[in-house]
Amino acid sequence: MVTEKLFYEDAYTKSFTANIVKQGVDEESRIFAVLSGTAFYPEGGGQPSDTGTLNGVRVMDVQTVDGEIRHYLERGLETTDGEVSGEINWPRRYDYMQQHAGQHILSAAFEELFDIQTTSFHLGEETVTIDLAAETLTEEILKQAEEKANQIILENRPIEVKWVTLEEASRYPLRKQLAVTGNVRLVIIPEFDYNGCGGTHPRVTGEVMAVKLLNWERQRKQVRLEFVCGSRVLKQLGEKQTVIKELSRLLNSPQGKIAEAARQLLEEKKALQSALDEAQGQLLECEAAALLRESENKEGQKLLVQVFKDRPIQALQKLARITVEKERNAIVIFVSESENKLQITAAGGNDTNVDLKKTAAATFPLIEGKGGGNPRFIQGGGRRTMSGAELARSFAGGLTPGALK
């Protein structure tokens, strides 16, 4: 038995009654019901499925499987006469109707104005995307396409639906090649767009309300364009207005001058960061000199071992490099000790003959850690299975003649 597709008879149907044809469980243990008729749109053609309820039981998904429309349910249906009442999640359905019709309008605008075809379409929960057969877009192209789409919407043109044969369909200026072999469902905006489509749409373009382009990016040799239609435009506007108001407050600047205030703030931050980096560099230079004065000799080389509490490993790496640049015959071992982990970096000056990488390979397993580097510089970390001082001593103890080049 073929399920009657009430969503094609009237896309505005919000509730209906039908008989249960069968209930079952699929291979993924999902409960489903097949009905004699349904207003629930099954996922297809880029449009997600409807949700809602059957006899108060939540319909979570609707799919066409082996020619039957399956309503996937939160639990099984209980009925004495086999009849069920369905309720569509109307806000979701209407939102998708707006987005889908808006996509038709926008795609037709790109094709009419610039001969750019749409190759695919995805209707997401928050935004819609189309892939365009173009390697790039310009701001002028985007502006003109958006203006054309919104012009068609404001004209409140009818959106007609017709079932025709393939031969009859060939008489229309279709925007893309048909992918069906039987009768064709055409969605038509007179004198603008003629398209084979199985989705749900409003009756007039005015119900789409508006189209707003958001972003685009290159996808291989195509462009992916992100946009919203209908109530999603208002949602985007509301979200952006909230952000703008907060930025205006934080920057103490009127809306029209927020960008200028932000640029000035970033420039100031960049200058401060540059000054801070320079000051930190000078401090590390002084620290390296002080540490070298306290270092000891080991086999004709200066050995400097130091344990720090919660010191960022990036700072210790810089300190290690500065130290061995100052003293080419120095070997430094720095450990940063925190509550749950140990991190270590070591460096050897150009006149040293030690292979730190070999020593590190024997040391990292002691803290169940890992790291990397080369014979003159290593870094890594792991769990705190010992104290920082013990790790430093273990690493220093590994600098035996066997670890020398």
Image (cartoon, rainbow, N blue to C red):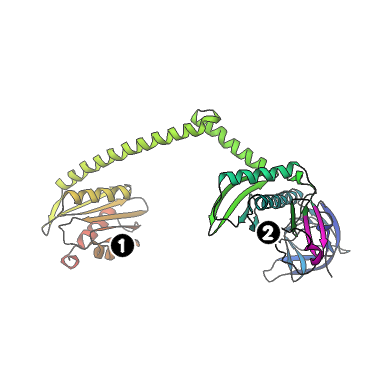
The image quadrant of residue 255 is: top right
Mark 2 burial class by Cα count in 10 Å: few <14, some 14-19, many 20+? some
Tell whether label 2 touches label 1 (CB within 8 Å).
no
Could you tell me if residue 209 is visible in this image?
Answer: no
Q: Position of residue 74 (x, y in %)?
A: 72, 60
Q: Residue at x 66, y 53 (%)?
A: 111
Quadrant that contains the N terminus: bottom right
Q: Position of residue 105 (x, y in %)?
A: 70, 50
Compare residues 10 and 283 and report the one nearer the observer.
10
Cα separation, mark 1 vs mark 2, equals: 52 Å
In the shown orientation, is residue 79 left or right of residue 137? right
In the shown orientation, is residue 246 left or right of residue 317? right
Quadrant that contains the C terminus: bottom left
Q: Position of residue 193 (x, y in %)?
A: 74, 53
In magenta stretch: residue 365: no
Which residue is the site of mark 2? 46
Q: Nearer the viewer, mark 1 or mark 2?
A: 2
Q: Position of residue 153 (x, y in %)?
A: 73, 44
Compare residues 14 and 270 and report the one nearer the observer.
270
Q: Secondary structure at mark 2?
A: loop
Q: Secondary structure at mark 1?
A: helix
In magenta stretch: residue 181: yes
Amino acid, disc 1: Phe
The label shown at residue 210 is none
In the picture as drawn, the residue positioned furthest to the left comes out as: 300
Mark 1 vs 2, N-terminal side = 2
In the shown orientation, is residue 307 left or right of residue 176? left
Q: Which residues are magenta?
A: 160-187
